[in-house]
Image (tube, rainbow, N blue to C red):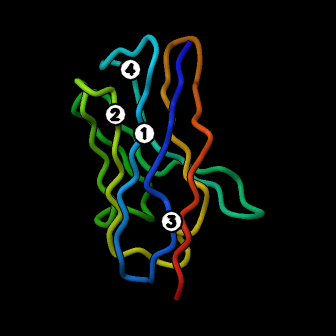
Amino acid sequence: QVRLVESGGGLVQAGGSLRLSCEASGSIFSSNNMGWYRQAPGQQRELVATITGSRTNYADSVKGRFTISRENTKNTVYLQMNSLKPEDTAVYYCTYQTVWRHYWGQGTQVTVSS
């Protein structure tokens, strides 16, 4: 069983920064994909960024502003968010994906005020 615990969300003004962390426990392999999704009120959940090994992938809306990284010795993935915009307001979910299953964290709220 895999457990994902996010932290680091909060309230920030537009233009500010936040760093999200997600610590994974259980059977974790560094070769598997980890990432971040987000869901705003009334919207579908959308991909923000993923990392597999050294390969990263970003949604167009966050490219150049967000950076995903991973510390395999700690089974932790980070999302550094800079130049935040009100439209980044959402619940952010950490994910860990194997061939058989997609695991999700409980989510952390990020609110960006204008």
Q: Name the side, left or right, on which 24 lies relative to 29.
A: right
Query: Which quarter of the image is occupied by the N terminus?
Result: top right
Q: Give the residue pinned by disc 1.
A: 22
Mark 3 or mark 1, which is nearer the start of the sequence?
3
**Crowding at mark 1 (Cα within 10 Å: few <14, some 14-19, many 20+):** many
Q: Which residue is mark 2?
A: 76
Q: Amino acid at mark 2?
A: Thr
Q: At x 28% / y 65%, what residue is drawn?
A: 64
- The residue at 65%/50% (across/down) is 45
Q: Are marks 3 and 2 in contact (CB under 8 Å)?
A: no
- Does the CB distance between marks 2 and 1 fall below 8 Å? yes
Name the residue tied to disc 4: 32
Indicate which disc, 2 or 1, sits on the residue closer to the N terminus: 1
Q: CA distance from mark 2 to mark 1?
A: 5 Å
Mark 3: few, some, or many residues within 10 Å (few <14, many ≥20)? some
Q: Position of residue 100 (x, y in %)?
A: 57, 11
Q: Amino acid at mark 4?
A: Asn
